[in-house]
């Protein structure tokens, strides 16, 4: 069964450094998402992406964050200058199409630790 | 803005017994989707069950079923014949019925412990 994959599984970085989290959505999916989960807290929406542009973003998704689909398979989240509070689990998700009934499929997550 | 509330931080159930996890939500919309996701210790998010608000019939998926009360804005998950593998964090989530975006709004989660 096709699945969303994410790399790396765990990323450790120093405060102020740039990180890029990578996701490979399911191949025929058109909608892509990033969510994050700070340890012990709820899962929060960051951004959705369709047709090579952001379709919606949360207030968390400030200028330090950016997303890109550099080729036909990868979907990346970049954090320009990491802060301690960016430490969290980051989940990528994808959805087949425009239909509101479509289910979002999640990847296994990337644990980001900012020291 | 839509909100999702899970009032039970933690629940326990004996293996083979039934447990119900509660979820309430707040929305002014009449059509939407509701979900239960399971997050085991591996932290992968796994879809358990989905309910369309326009359907009166409660969704079922093997041992998992929901009690959807639209007027009360309540969406509980019932797990029958609980198994050790059901132990996980369970998140209730809401999504608007719209063509674009479709972000999920999650509750805080309920930890389910299964005792053997």
Image (spheres, coloured by chain):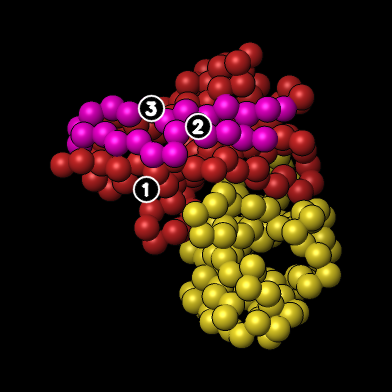
- Whether residues under marks 2 and 3 lie with C-beta atoms below 8 angstroms apart, the answer is no
Q: Nearer the viewer, residue B83 or A40?
A: A40
The span shown in magenta is B3-27
User: The chain drawn red is chain what?
Assistant: B
> Which image quadrant for residue B74?
top right
- Residue B13 in the figure: left or right of residue A54: left
The answer to if B26 sits in the magenta stretch is yes
**Callout 3: few (<14), some (14-19), or many (20+) C-alpha neighbours within 10 Å?**
some
- Residue A39 in the figure: left or right of residue B28: left
Q: What secondary structure is marked by label 3?
A: strand
Mark 2 vs 1, N-terminal side? 2
User: The chain drawn yellow is chain what?
Assistant: A
The residue tagged 3 is B20
User: Residue A49 location, x and y as percent?
Assistant: 76, 60
Residue A59 seen from this side: yes
The residue tagged 2 is B7
Quarter of the image where the N terminus of chain A is located: bottom left
- Residue B96 in the figure: left or right of residue B57: right
Residue B86 seen from this side: no
For image coordinates 73% across by 22% down, the residue present is B30
Between the residue at mark 3 and the residue at mark 1, the CA separation in whole angstroms equals 14 Å
Mark 2 vs 3, N-terminal side? 2
């Amino acid at each position: 069964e096709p699945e969303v994959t994410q790399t790396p599984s765990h990323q450790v970085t120093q405060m102020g450094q740039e990180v890029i989290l990578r996701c490979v959505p399911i191949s025929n999916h058109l909608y892509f998402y990033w969510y994050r989960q700070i340890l012990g807290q709820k899962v929060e929406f960051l951004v959705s992406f369709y047709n090579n542009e952001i379709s919606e973003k949360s207030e968390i998704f400030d200028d330090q964050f950016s997303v890109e689909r550099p080729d036909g398979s990868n979907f990346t989240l970049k954090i320009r200058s990491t802060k301690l509070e960016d430490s969290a689990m980051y989940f990528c998700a994808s959805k087949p199409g425009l239909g509101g009934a479509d289910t979002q499929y999640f990847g296994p997550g990337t644990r980001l630790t900012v020291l | 803005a839509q909100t999702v509330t899970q009032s039970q931080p933690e629940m326990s159930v004996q293996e083979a017994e039934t447990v119900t996890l509660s979820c309430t939500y707040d929305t002014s919309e009449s059509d939407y989707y509701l979900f239960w996701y399971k997050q085991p210790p591996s932290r992968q998010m796994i879809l358990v069950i989905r309910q369309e608000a326009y359907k009166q019939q409660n969704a079922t998926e093997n041992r998992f079923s929901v009690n959807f009360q639209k007027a009360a804005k309540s969406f509980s998950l019932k797990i029958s014949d609980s198994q050790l593998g059901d132990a996980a964090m369970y998140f209730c989530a809401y999504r608007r019925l719209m063509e674009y975006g479709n972000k999920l709004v999650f509750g805080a989660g309920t930890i389910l412990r299964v005792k053997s």
